[in-house]
Image (cartoon, grey):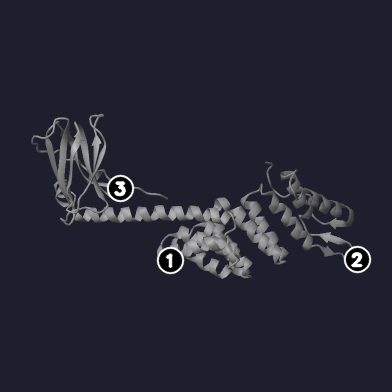
Amino acid sequence: MKRFIGMAMLLALVVGLSAMPMFAQNGTLKGSTKDENGKPMAQNTSVQLEPIENKGKAMTLDLDSKGDFSSTTVPVGTYNVWLVRDGEKIDGRGKVPVEAGKEVKIDFDVKADRAKMGINEEELKKYEAVKKSNENIRGLNAMLAQVRDLMKAGNYDQSIALLKPAAEQNPQQDLVWGYLGDAYASSKKYPEAIDAYNKAIALKPKDGGYLSGLANSYAKSGQADKAVETYNAAAEAEPTHAATYYFNEGALFTNTQHPQEAVAAFDKAIAADPNKAEAYYYKGENLIAMAKLDPKTNKMIAAPGTAESFQKYIELKPDGPLVGQAKSYLEALGEKVETTYGKGKTSGKKQ
């Protein structure tokens, strides 16, 4: 998510110097500075000497109140001389020789120097806008990293306290709204989570993660119809994770005691991923809930596919945590339940 723009276009080096006699051991470097508005520079600005091929010594010269700089103790050498403001090189001179006993004078005029290099005001404005955007993004990324740590530690209120103002100040950043939705959902503030997820989705409509988070929040706030609609939208938006979204839909119907709808959802999960073992198991549990009593024999008749669902789970996950319960269901089906299901098996491939 981080983006950067190079500074090279603004920093072409111009060779320039004048000379006059000075000390024998070192040379003198002095000069003046003017900013983009032609005013002397001083605050948060310095002149930095960068020796070329180890001929000289790196130095930083401070500016006085008039924006001037001067040093009589610059070691003999050849330098790139930079005008640096807030840590950023904004103007420069290249291959400046400093000779023993001689003086070099450099007058930085940012506006005039940029004009000489063909950099117009419109380009500078675009650059400044990109720079500001990049700085903002770096700040947001640092904040989101902090939020991730807080969320892992269960500090949801602190996460919300960081995310809420960030979202308000950066309303076009879908990721911030998405994180805010996660934080609200984790703290069981579902109306707020729904609002945050909707804002993220408005910016990025085909994000399955946002849609799934919204669907989960609908489900946990009792809005089953909206949850199903949104799970389906998530599956369509992100087919590679469709099995997970359909599985969550099945879990919703299971928890709300709608076994027929749950079975349909788990079937969709299985169709999306035939190796999703848990979908077979929970499909089987919901089929058990749909079993009927034979009025003539007073025996339970399992819904078609019940035994096959549990068998498929065991086949896919022989060491899975639900194997014991699946086997118990199968034993019950074999000893106490008559099944009218045919010989066909639920499709699926071994892992």
Residue identified by numbered label 2: 296
Q: Amino acid at mark 2?
A: Lys
Q: Is residue 148 left or right of residue 309?
A: left
Quadrant in the picture for the C terminus: top right
- Which residue occupies 80% across, 62% down? 291
Q: CA distance from mark 1 to mark 2?
A: 67 Å
- Count every numbered label the image shows and give the total: 3
Q: CA distance from mark 2 to mark 3?
A: 89 Å
Residue 145 locus on image (x, y percent): 49, 52
Residue 108 in view (yes/no): no
- Image quadrant in which you'd find residue 79: top left
Mark 1 surroundings: few (<14), some (14-19) or many (≥20) residues within 10 A = few
Q: Amino acid at mark 1?
A: Glu
Q: Secondary structure at mark 2?
A: loop
Which mark is on residue 168? 1
- Which residue occupies 19% across, 36% down? 73
Mark 3 surroundings: few (<14), some (14-19) or many (≥20) residues within 10 A = few
Q: Is residue 253 left or right of residue 73?
A: right
Residue 61 locus on image (x, y percent): 23, 43
- Which residue occupies 75% across, 56% down? 284
